[in-house]
Image (cartoon, helix red, strand yellow):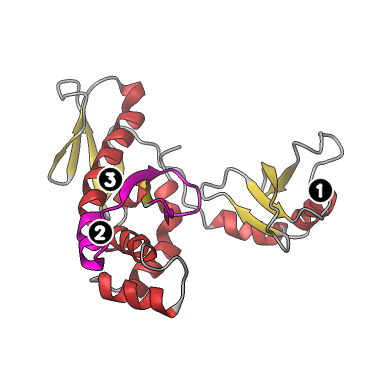
Amino acid sequence: MIDWLRREIAEPTVSLAGRTLPVAVRRNARARRLTLRLAPDGSEVRVTLPRWCATREALAFVAARTDWLEAQLAKIPEHRPIEPGGTVAYRGAALAIDWQASFPRTPRLAGERLEVGGPHESLAPRIQRWLEREAVRLLSADLAEYAGRAGVPLPALRLSRAQRRWGSCSTSGTVRINWRLVMAPDHVRRSVVAHEVAHCLHFDHSPAFHAALARVFDGDIAAADAWIKAHGRSLYAGFG
């Protein structure tokens, strides 16, 4: 149940499956109803409410849906620490983390292994930085390819660390893609890039947008969407 009696209402929590999670209450002027979500990594419960809704009503909404929240929490993959002998996902495959003191500090790909040296305690952030550099390399190529197919100027690329959105496209011509997609299979990453490029032509999800996406993307959109729905949360395991 929601613990708002013993804590300030600004810092509510909820008990789920033996865990106590913070509840982030957010008002949105455009919201028409209460919406409830669990953070992709299971770290908090998020409830969005319209301007007219009382905070206590939002917290009661959370309390009434703890069964659903527990079911969502059970779907989140177990945290995988990034450590020697473990694995890290890269382009849909699991790379073995081969840490040896004699290896360079900067990770390097060696077949199905990721060789890396340097201090053990900074291993995870250095591997994350390597993944982010790989994301920029791969996404830049994807973006150039699909922008060319769509006949639009090459958008600026920015990496995103969003918790729920895999990509976005602004009217200023900037495409943001979640860096974690470098861990997904290539067709999944590329589908998100193609999706955002199609938005450069149509800033909606109209039939014209979907026709543009089908024309630009060279893979199976339905299969890519199904992979994200089934496995997207797994990309949050191992990194903060």
- Give the residue type at disc 1: Thr
> How many neighbours does mark 2 have within 10 angstroms: few (below 14), some (14-19), or many (20 or more)?
some
| Depth check, front residue: 205 or 73 | 205
Which residue is denoted by mark 3 in the rendering? Answer: 135
For numbered disc 3, what is the local secondary structure?
A: helix
Pinpoint residue 128: horizontal percent, then vertical percent: 33, 36
- Give the residue type at disc 2: Asp
Classify residue 35 by image quadrant.
bottom right
In this rendering, the answer to whether 111 lies above or below 226 is above
- Give the residue type at disc 3: Ala
Tell whether 177 sits left or right of 103. Answer: right
Look at the numbered discs 2 and 3 and tell me whether their residues touch, using CB distance below 8 Å: no
Pinpoint residue 134: horizontal percent, then vertical percent: 24, 43
For numbered disc 1, what is the local secondary structure?
A: helix
Q: State which tag comes first along the sequence, 2 or 3.
A: 3
Q: CA distance from mark 1 to mark 2?
A: 43 Å
User: Which of pointers 1 and 2 indicates the residue nearer the eye?
Assistant: 1
Tell whether 202 sits left or right of 90. Answer: right
Q: State which tag comes first along the sequence, 1 or 2.
A: 1
Asked whether 79 falls inside the magenta stretch, the response is: no
> How many neighbours does mark 1 have within 10 angstroms: few (below 14), some (14-19), or many (20 or more)?
some
Which residue is denoted by mark 1 in the rendering? Answer: 55
For numbered disc 2, what is the local secondary structure?
A: helix
Which residue is denoted by mark 2 in the rendering? Answer: 186
Look at the numbered discs 1 and 3 and tell me whether their residues touch, using CB distance below 8 Å: no
Tell whether 72 sits left or right of 223. Answer: right
The stretch in magenta equals 143-172
